[in-house]
Image (cartoon, grey):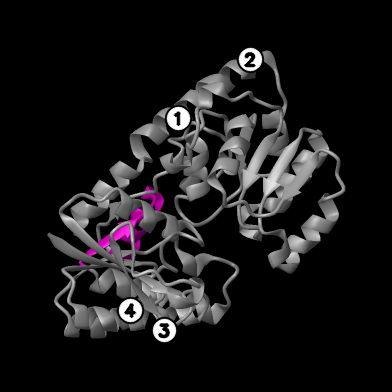
């Protein structure tokens, strides 16, 4: 049995984001050949359970996000020197600045998911982007296996570093918590994301204000000046409903299952879990036109580059109705073939 230490996330049970959901589901779907140990941030958990679903939890007394994530990951790697797991699975590159030293101190196999080209994101300062780029470079150089979550990122790694990587996305079937056949469709559209400029939130809201179609938009509106400004601008628009973050899977199931279509504005970050999850529901997908989203949806969704594109896509006509039904079926088929947790978990285990 292989012992695998998982570092770089807030921890499990999942209470934060995509990597945490990934870890929770790969350990829940693991084979009997793998013994996982997940490192968790003690700051995120009031009650520190020693295990979760028979997976050992180790708590680190440092926050896992922001600048502290670097020290959190390095502390975790130092513990791995002592614990000597067969494999260390690193999620994200924050602590990979320490890998040259770790490689000298440990014989553990290093498997690193480099995430979605974090250094390219506008939300980081110039200094932070340079640091993340260096961390990415060291991750690629000193890891035994590099995982990318989207083929576009795999292509980037091959071109930038002349290194091959293993593309493993995310599962989404955990969001199907009820019977889709018994759900009555409604006329609203749905979007779920963190409220950040790179997710084209303003573009989507502007389009729906113009079209008059009903929109339910779930996000962390109160966490930034950008979000608060958008909330103030659009919360009084009659056809637009701005909802705070929803974490209950049953409530999310109802929102997704009943909507007429899903609008995905992400322009960065590789394969976005929210898109993979929406594809499970056999519904039309309107995605921002970038390589990440085209790879994720198999080039079979509707794509928009600006508000005018999205507006034109949403204008209904009889011919488009047939296209909508066919595309909805394509999305479900792709999700079933690529984005289930048993597939993802097995793919990760093959890298250990």
Q: Which residues, given as a range, are shown in magenta?
A: 144-161
- The majority secondary structure of the magenta stretch comes to helix
Q: CA distance from mark 3 to mark 2?
A: 56 Å
Q: Is residue 159 magenta?
A: yes
**Is disc 3 in contact with disc 4, using a CB cutoff of under 8 Å?**
no
Q: Circle 1 sits on which residue? A: 332
Q: CA distance from mark 4 to mark 1?
A: 38 Å
Look at the image and tell me in which quarter the N terminus lies: bottom left
Local secondary structure at mark 3: helix
Residue ID at (79%, 34%): 211
Side of 43 relative to 163 (left or right): right
Residue 142 visible in the shown view: yes
- Label at residue 76: 4
Q: Quadrant of residue 204?
A: top right
Q: Label 3: few (<14), some or many (≥20) within 10 Å?
A: some
Local secondary structure at mark 4: helix
Q: Nearer the viewer, mark 4 or mark 1?
A: 4
Query: Residue 134: where, in percent of width, then height?
Result: 39, 77
Of mark 2 and mark 1, the one earlier in the sequence is: 2
Local secondary structure at mark 2: helix
Q: Circle 3 sits on which residue? A: 71
Q: Nearer the viewer, mark 4 or mark 2?
A: 4
Query: Residue 50: where, in percent of width, then height?
Result: 34, 70
Of mark 3 and mark 1, the one earlier in the sequence is: 3
Q: CA distance from mark 4 to mark 2?
A: 56 Å
Residue ID at (51%, 44%): 275
């Amino acid at each position: 049995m292989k012992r695998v230490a998982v570092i770089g996330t807030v921890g499990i049970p999942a209470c934060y984001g995509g990597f945490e959901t990934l870890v929770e589901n790969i350990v829940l779907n693991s084979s009997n050949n793998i013994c996982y140990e997940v490192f968790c941030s003690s700051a995120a958990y009031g009650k520190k359970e020693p295990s979760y679903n028979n997976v050992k939890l180790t708590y680190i007394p440092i926050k896992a996000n922001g600048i502290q994530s670097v020290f959190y990951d390095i502390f975790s790697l130092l513990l791995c020197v002592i614990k000597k797991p067969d494999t260390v699975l690193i999620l994200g590159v924050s602590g990979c600045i320490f890998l040259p030293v770790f490689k000298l101190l440990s014989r553990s196999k290093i498997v690193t998911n480099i995430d979605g080209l974090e250094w390219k994101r506008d939300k980081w300062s110039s200094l932070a982007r340079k640091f993340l780029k260096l961390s990415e470079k060291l991750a690629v150089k000193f890891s035994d296996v590099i995982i990318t979550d989207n083929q576009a990122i795999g292509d980037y790694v091959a071109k930038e570093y002349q290194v091959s990587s293993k593309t493993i996305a995310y599962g989404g079937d955990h969001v199907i918590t009820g019977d889709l056949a018994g759900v009555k469709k409604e006329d609203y559209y749905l979007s779920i994301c963190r409220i950040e400029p790179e997710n084209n939130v303003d573009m989507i809201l502007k389009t729906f204000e113009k079209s008059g179609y009903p929109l339910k938009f779930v996000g962390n509106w109160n966490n930034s000046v950008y979000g608060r400004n958008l909330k103030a601008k659009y919360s009084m628009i009659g056809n637009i409903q701005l909802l705070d973050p929803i974490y209950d899977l049953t409530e999310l199931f109802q929102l997704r299952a009943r909507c007429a279509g899903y609008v995905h504005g992400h322009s960065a970050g590789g394969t976005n879990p929210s898109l993979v999850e929406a594809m499970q529901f056999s519904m039309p997908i309107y995605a921002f036109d970038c390589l990440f989203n085209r790879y994720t949806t198999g080039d079979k969704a509707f794509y928009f580059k600006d508000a005018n594109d999205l507006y034109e896509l949403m204008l209904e006509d009889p011919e488009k109705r047939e296209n909508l039904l066919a595309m909805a079926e394509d999305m479900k088929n792709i999700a079933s073939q690529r984005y289930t947790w048993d597939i993802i978990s097995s793919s990760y285990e093959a890298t250990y």
